[in-house]
């Protein structure tokens, strides 16, 4: 199957309340919590509550309600950490790693919201 979901992944366990997290936001279809190893002063992970592995999986299989909720949750988190330019913030970066070349570690879709300092180059040149 193209999108085999491992329900023992760490974010599935956080969603089930088996592992604690520093929760920032919870909505009908999404949850946001601080990354355990922050790469910026503000580093929040936004995840859908549904069992989606990657962005392409979510885009193909999620309902319109889930897609809208998740998109708005990401925007809300940017506002909540004070980074949304539209609300006077100094900006942020979104990252959604997928699969091997994306170097995705946790196989449950997540968007990283990074903010709080200038973030440098988008991708390391090599
Ligand atoms: P990926 O490489 O999959 O895009 O990012 C996974 C992220 O999850 C990493 O930034 C890592 O620090 C974070 N992470 C891994 N395990 C945990 C955990 O148990 N709790 C939290 N809050 N973040 C985690």
Image (cartoon, rainbow, N blue to C red):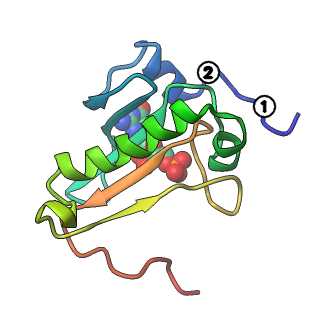
Nearer to the camera, 10 or 76: 76
Q: Is mark 1 on a helix, strand or loop?
A: loop
27 versus 70 height, above or below? above
In the image, what residue occupies the spot 47% across and 59% down?
Answer: 95
* Picture quadrant where residue 5 is located: top right
User: In the rendered image, which residue does mark 2 sit on?
Assistant: 8
Q: Where is residue 94 in the image (x, y as percent from the top left)?
A: 41, 60
Q: What element carries label 2?
A: loop
* Picture quadrant where residue 17 is located: top left
In the image, what residue occupies the spot 57% across and 56% down?
Answer: 97
Q: In this view, does 107 lie to the left or right of 77?
A: right
Which of label 2 and label 1 is nearer to you? 1
Mark 1 and ligand 1: say if the CB distance to the nearest ligand atom is below 8 Å. no
Gap in angstroms between the C-alphas marked 2 and 1: 12 Å
Ligand 1 falls in quadrant = top left
* Picture quadrant where residue 126 is located: bottom right
83 versus 19 height, above or below? below
Q: Where is residue 40 in the image (x, y as percent from the top left)?
A: 26, 60
- Which quadrant of the figure contains the N terminus? top right
Q: Position of residue 91 (x, y in %)?
A: 24, 68
Farthest left residue?
88
Instruction: Tell me the crowding category of disc 2: few under 14, some 14 to 19, or many 20 or more residues within 10 angstroms, Cα based.
Output: few
User: In the rendered image, which residue does mark 1 sit on?
Assistant: 4
Farthest front residue?
64
Nearer to the camera, 37 or 115: 115
Q: Where is residue 15 in the image (x, y as percent from the top left)?
A: 45, 20
84 versus 65 height, above or below? below
């Amino acid at each position: 199957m193209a999108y085999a979901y491992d329900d023992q992944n760490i974010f599935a366990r956080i969603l089930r309340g088996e592992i604690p997290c520093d929760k920032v936001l919870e909505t009908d279809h999404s949850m946001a919590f601080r990354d355990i190893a922050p790469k910026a002063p503000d580093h929040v992970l936004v995840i859908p509550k549904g069992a989606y592995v990657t962005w392409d999986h979510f885009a193909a299989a999620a309902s319109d309600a889930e897609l809208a909720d998740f998109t708005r949750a990401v925007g809300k988190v940017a506002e909540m950490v004070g980074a949304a330019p539209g609300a006077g913030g100094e900006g942020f970066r979104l990252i959604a790693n997928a699969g091997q070349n994306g170097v995705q570690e946790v196989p449950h879709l997540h968007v990283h919201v990074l903010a709080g300092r200038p973030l440098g180059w988008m991708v390391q040149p090599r």
